[in-house]
Image (cartoon, rainbow, N blue to C red):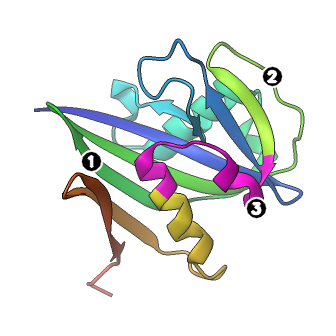
Amino acid sequence: MLLRNGTAAFLRNNNKYLLIKRSESKVLLPGLWSGVGGHMEPCEINDPLLTCYREIEEETGITKDKISELELLYIIIRRSKDEIRQSYIYFGETTQEEVIQTKEGTLLWVPESEWTDRQFSSTFSKMLTHYKKRKKEDRAVYVGVAEDDLGKLRMIWAKCEDFEK
């Protein structure tokens, strides 16, 4: 069993979130919408936030100093054939509206109310539905495990808390 670790960021500016429609040439999730992100490099394996900042800058041109309150809110775990895929999902704010376009896909600022008009991966769709129901003050990290429920995806959500307070 192989492991594939990655990150994604959903950055907000003026009540719109920066989304990317992945290029049709991508191996994983071609043509689907997502937050900005990508795979962890070996030197980043213990620091997904480092990966997140690197990917944001590479794919959008937005630098770390233009981002605030970037917080890990979700960890999604799923199996795909002979891989365990683990995604660290961050949400934050940015003061920069201008973005670059790369071969990764098309970037667009989208209001939360229009997320349902976009096609995300199944796990991201479930995560975004969960996110919309959260209270603004809920800064907990939720772990979502993808489960097969008679041929349909079911996400099991658990709040990841420090039990040694």
Q: Indicate left or right for 117 with 162 as reference.
A: right
Residue 48 picture location, percent across and down? 44, 43
Between 151 and 52, the residue placed more toward the observer is 151
Q: Are marks 2 and 3 in contact (CB under 8 Å)?
A: no
| Res. 103 image quadrant | top right
Q: Which residue is denoted by mark 1 in the rendering? A: 78
Q: CA gap, disc 1 to disc 2?
A: 31 Å
Q: CA gap, disc 2 to disc 3?
A: 24 Å
Q: Residue at x 55, y 33 (%)?
A: 32
Q: Indicate left or right for 68 with 34 as reference.
A: right
Name the amino acid type tagged 3: Ser
Label 2's element? loop
Residue 134 picture location, percent across and down? 57, 78
- Secondary structure predominantly adopted by residues drawn in magenta: helix
Answer above or below: position of 52 versus 77: above
Q: CA gap, disc 1 to disc 3?
A: 27 Å
Q: Which residue is denoted by mark 3 in the rendering? A: 113
Q: Are marks 1 and 2 in contact (CB under 8 Å)?
A: no
Segment tinted magenta in the rendering: 110-125
Q: Residue at x 55, y 40 (%)?
A: 52
Q: Residue at x 72, y 25 (%)?
A: 106
Q: Which residue is denoted by mark 2 in the rendering? A: 100
Few, some or many residues within 10 Å of mark 1 (<14, 14–19, 20+): some
Name the amino acid type tagged 1: Arg
